Image (cartoon, rainbow, N blue to C red):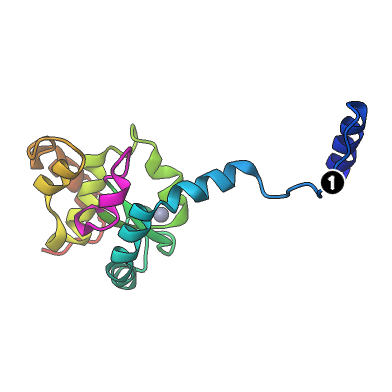
Amino acid sequence: MGMRRVTDVMLGWVGLQRKTPMKRTPIKQTGKKMRRNTPKRAKADRAARKPRRAFQDQFLWCWFCENAPAAGVHEIASGTGNRGPAVQQRFTWAAACWDCNSMRLTDKSEWPVARQLAFKYVNDREFFNLAEFNVLRGHAPGAITMADVIPHICRLIDKGRKWQC
Ligand SMILES: [Zn+2]
């Protein structure tokens, strides 16, 4: 209310009159929504909906903090231009809670991709595919190697995380 009154007063200063009520939707959010709904992306999202739901049904708990329910599918390979294909490829999926997905894992100094891949290896090894993962990110098939991932797997073992051979 306060904001609106101030704006109307300001319009009055320049001799204009508001004809429609002020929009309440923040502009930033609208822009984000429009970007997500491009036809190409919407098609990719639709195609991935079922397998992603199955994945979410399989993994109900966050792999990373093991302290909260998984809130969605985290794409380990996400980044510029990767989200479209990453949405459909299980080798890049991880189960993450809201906090890990949107906050913790975005810190790549603490959570490099090789470390995140160690969680994929431990939790969903059947769908671990390093070569395809590298290619999806626009790198050579051998860009990240098992030598990069194994130390992080060892850290998980040393921490006494769940581990099944
Ligand atoms: Zn978490």
Q: Which of 71 and 135 is in front in this view?
A: 135
Q: Quadrant of residue 77?
A: top left
Can you tell me which quadrant of the image ligand 1 is in? bottom left
Image quadrant holding the C terminus, namely: bottom left
Residue that lies at the very extreme toward the top in this rendered image: 14
In the image, residue 82 lies in the stretch drawn in magenta = yes
55 left or right of 15 in image: left
Q: Which of 137 and 66 is in front in this view?
A: 137
In the image, residue 135 lies in the stretch drawn in magenta = no
- Disc 1 target residue: 19
Is disc 1 surrounded by few (<14), some (14 to 19) or many (20+) residues within 10 Å?
A: few
- State whether residue 23 is above or below residue 138: below
Q: Which residue is rendered at x = 91% and y = 29% of the image?
A: 15
24 left or right of 134 in image: right
Position of residue 118 measured from the top left corner of the image (x, y, whole percent): 20, 49
- Circle 1: element type: loop
Q: Quadrant of residue 62?
A: bottom left
Q: Nearer the viewer, residue 34 or 92?
A: 34
Q: Give the range drawn in magenta.
A: 77-92
Amino acid identity at mark 1: Lys
Position of residue 130 measured from the top left corner of the image (x, y, whole percent): 12, 47
58 left or right of 25 in image: left
- State whether residue 106 is above or below residue 68: above
Q: Which residue is rendered at x = 88% and y = 30% of the image?
A: 10
Position of residue 147 measured from the top left corner of the image (x, y, whole percent): 9, 38
Q: Which residue is rendered at x = 18% and y = 48% of the image?
A: 153
79 left or right of 115 in image: right
Q: In which quarter of the image is residue 105?
A: top left
State how many labels appear. 1
